[in-house]
Amino acid sequence: MNGPPPGPPRPKPPHRWRMLGPGLAMLVLAGAGLVVSSTRPTSPQTPAPPEPPIAPSPTPRVAAPPPRPIPSAPVPPAEAPQPEDTATPEQREAAREAAREYRAGRFNAFFRKAAFMEEFARQGLTRIRGLRDELADPSALRQLPPDARFLENKPEPVLERMAMIDLLFELAPSEPSARDAMTSLALSPIDRGLPDSVKKGLVGEKYDLLFRLAQVDRQLAVDTFAKLESPKLKNLLREALIAGLAESGASPDEVQRMTAHL
């Protein structure tokens, strides 16, 4: 046989898996670790604190319309309270009734004037107010005819009002309010628009009031006369003042002295 002699035999190549060597093992181990790590239970973690709830933005409220007023039933107007110094209609009616009884009793032999006045005075200021306010109202005189006479055959309303003046005169010595009522009535002005018959009646009543007042309180009568604003009325009532002072027991010299400045 020609040619070179055969050399030593070549070594057999290692199997392929052996060529992978430790790299494959590392890959297998890494895969196994991945599997292990994926199947291993995770350790419990501390839960994060819950976030505070977000308050909803306030929804703007639409103002409700004001309630409609419910129409109420009309209330009748209340009567105006009367001043404390004014007599009520009942008190005025009681004053008229007392004047009628007093006037009728003076012509009755069994009429007890002292007992009547004592009973009348128990009502005090209310009776005096009734007399004053009734005399201050000339409505009764308005009912008289234009040709009414006051010196003779006096009409019933005139006689009734004269009796009221008599009652004030009876109360005046012990009741200052009665004297005040007589003064205010004597000084009250006379409406020029009244009929002549009514004005004559009012002048006659002022004459009686001043005449009676001078018998009770001389100085008060003089002072009341001095306050009269109408010169014509003063001329008409001067005689009433002088006659009343004389009736009270004043001497002519005293009357002259008390009225010299008037």
Image: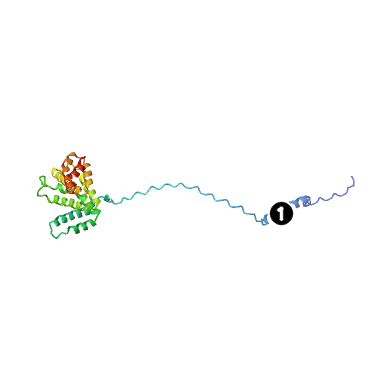
Residue occupying the point 18% across, 41% down: 234
State left or right for residue 6 relative to residue 155.
right
Task: Give residue 31's position: percent from left, percent from top.
Answer: 71, 53
Task: Give residue 177's position: percent from left, percent from top.
Answer: 25, 51
Q: Quadrant of residue 187?
A: top left
Q: Using the image as rendered, state which of residue 6 and residue 104 is in the foreground.
A: 104
Residue occupying the point 14% across, 49% down: 158
Residue 166 seen in this snapshot: yes
Image vertical order of residue 237 relative to residue 112, above or below: above
Task: Give residue 95's position: percent from left, percent from top.
Answer: 20, 54
Q: Amino acid at mark 1?
A: Gly
Q: Using the image as rendered, state which of residue 20 and residue 208 is in the foreground.
A: 208
Badge 1 crowding class, 10 Å Cα cut-off, few under 14, some 14 to 19, many 20 or more, is: few
Q: Quadrant of residue 38?
A: bottom right
Residue 184 seen in this snapshot: no
| Residue carrying label 1 | 33
Work out which quarter of the rendered image holds the C terminus and state it.
top left
Task: Give residue 167's position: percent from left, percent from top.
Answer: 19, 53
Q: Using the image as rendered, state which of residue 63 and residue 27 is in the foreground.
A: 63
Q: Count the marks: how many?
A: 1
State left or right for residue 221 relative to residue 53.
left
Q: Helix, strand, or loop for circle 1?
A: helix
Which residue reaches farthest bottom? 110
